[in-house]
Image: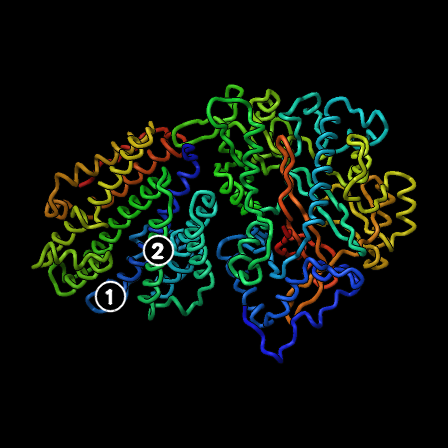
Amino acid sequence: MTTLLARYADCIFWLARYMERAENLARLLDVHETFSRDHRGRLDYSALIRINADEATFAARGVRPSAENVIAFYVTDASNPNSIISSVRAARENARILRPLISTEMWSQINVFYNRLLALEPREATRTNLARFCNGIKESCQTHAGVVEGTYYRDQGWYFYHLGKTIERADQTTRLLDIKYHALAAAEDGAGSAQDLGQWHALLRSVAGYHAFRRVHPRGMTPALVAGFILLDQSFPRSLHTCARQVDGLLNGLRSRYGLRGGSGALERLDEIRAVLGSSTADALVARGLHSFLDWVQLRLIDVTREIGTDFFGYAAPAVASQTQMQG
Amino acid sequence: MTPRDDKASDILEGYDPGGFYCELLGLPEHPAEHAAEIRARLGTLDFAELRRRAKEAERELYNLGITFLVYSDKEAVDRILPFDVIPRVISASEWERLDAGVVQRVTALNLFLHDVYHDQKILKDGVVPPELVLGNANYRPQMQGLDVPLDTYVHICGIDLVRDGDGTFRVLEDNARVPSGVSYVIENRHMMQRAFSDLLADIPIRPVDGYGQKLLEAMYEIAPAAPGEPQVVLLSPGAYNSAYFEHIFLAREMGVPLVEGHDLVVQDDRVWMKTINGLSRVDAIYRRVGDDFLDPRAFNPDSLLGVPGILEVYRKGRVALANAIGTGVADDKAVYAYVPRMIKYYLGEDAIIPNVETHICREGEGLRYTLDNLDKLVVKPVGEAGGYGITIGPRATKAELDECRAKLEADPANYISQPMVPLSVCPTVVDHGIEPRHVDLRPFAITGRKTWVLPGGLTRVALRKGTLIVNSSQGGGSKDTWVLA
């Protein structure tokens, strides 16, 4: 069989990333409702904007960061590249290019999904029915995952699809955890309060991890336990540890099964993350400052993506290798 | 099939072809007996049910992405080619003649191209005016003296046929560059099999599924000798080309990569594609990119769709292209008029499928006749595709006729004229019932060592009442075409 075209590998990597991003945006929006109240019950949607580093894009809208405005910004605003509709559109544009490769069912499902979002009535995604709306998005993304699993031919593209999906998931997991950091920093009554516990609880639920967490930790819920679960658990599908191990497996699989020459740079960058994850306890990560750690992971994931792009997608090699060090 | 109750009327009862030849009924004096069974089955359908199934079929086409892109404002919108569920039926004996006629015509076009790019005997013998060919914008001097594999230039050809008032098929136009539409032929059949299996049941219809394999065989036949299986690719202008669905369709049918110009690179007298493991050799390219855009070094320097240097590799015989470069001189609307003489010249035969009578305005006689009968003729610019720039005399206003006259007088060589052919009609589902709509037929022929014609072809239907222009860009739709076995 023909070796995969570099452009297709690029497109399917990003197709997967955008679908995973749409799902995680829905998760983020959903859980944020819980975080949007401070201890006096006030609403603060601006944390969402900070977590996604979208301050400048949002400010350009010239509107208040009210619940309605922020929700619209992340759901239906086609000019926000980080909105759900933009992510699904980008996934669809990649899918359009990939149609020679992907199954008809895969294209059809994304196509129908996007067209439904296009036809969205303003009242369908407001604060009052946000949970239902977010559920719908999650379900469509999970349907996509199911169609891929059930119909996609297991070729090299399969590996790049999962590389994209897993790297995006790892990135989004760090952002979800970071939202808690922001909420915590803003709270006056601090760690251990009833509000704090409620937020950790909601965070776990947003990643569908509450029950799994309880199986591992039947008693108690401390910030370190939750952060440790989300970052270091070896069996939780959205944990950073699981994602990093999968990326490693995918890169090695590509090299061994198809004899590809590339991928060593990405593996080296990934090893930096895995080394830290392998040698750290949750307590130590929290004590050293979760936010700076999460930032560092996000930068390393960008490096991994860049190495994959250079080795497989035909991107020009970066002039100077990134030298960002772990902070704190 | 939902049987109608006894009181319901035959849905075709009020149908009146309006004096045109009807593809389902024939002429009153010569009924189309081969279609009688299908006509009878249609008659038993309930109109509301028919409409519902037709709507579902169109929805499915849309969801499956069997669409073309239309650009309005800044947004690119996916549109389906409107699909009419009442099939167009061709008898076995009629198809046998059409098949032979298409093979004959494609054979002559290939001989003509070989002659034009070698000895130019047909020009020297005065059968085709040399200036018409050598002065043609689509004539490619780079092809002069070059031998192409199997002497085949037009590997994929679409020949537009119309049926006139007495039921005679005539050639309206040849498409020898990058003809499109074949994907709809096959998808329309699949759609009918899903939505109207009851209508098709036990009717012996010739299958259309073999197209992709025939095309791949032809690509293998023209590929330069190389160790192992030749690597075939389909070169597309990209996902924003309006025919992208067809490119996808054909790449999938052939099981070959769909590439864009920037996926390919010329190195060491070879064409390569960029893969995740470096460069990989390409032997044969089914290109859906026009000559102008194929190689910015040789043709349009602004083209981003092509592959710089590919012409040189092609000239060295290190890569095969289908269609060959320079086939546009054979499907020019002015050259078209000479095809019957071409057939006689090369094959010593009369054209099995005649042309529509054509007046060549570059010739004094043709121009005079055209100007004298402007209100009765269809005037076509010779360079345009897609039904643009056509003046239909009998339907034109005085101002439109005056404008046409001025254009003709200013640049007569750019025009041909033809009588208005009373195109045949086919019963077609419209909002409130079934009405006649004009149709044409584009059979597709594939030529490697031999020429093979896909049974049937694309039936395009002019959905707007009374209009004769069937092009998808001008409000046309399509129908499934059934060739009876």
In the picture, the disc for residue A141 is 2
Give the SS element for disc 2: helix
Question: Crowdedness of circle 2 by 10 Å Cα count: few (<14), some, many (20+)?
Answer: many
**In the displayed structure, does residue A107 sit left or right of residue B156?**
left
Q: Amino acid at mark 2?
A: Cys
Query: If the image is split into quadrants, where does the N terminus of chain B sit?
Result: bottom right
Residue A261 at x, y = what percent?
33, 27
Give amino acid for label 1: Arg
Compared with B357, B111 (above or below) is above
Please tell me the numbered disc located at residue A37.
Answer: 1
Is residue B63 among what the camera can see? yes
Residue B127 sits above or below residue A199 on the image: above
Lower sequence index among marks 2 and 1? 1
Q: Characterize the local packing of mark 1: few (<14), some (14-19) or many (20 or more) Cα atoms within 10 angstroms.
A: some
Q: Quadrant location of residue B294? A: top right
> Dot 1: what SS?
loop
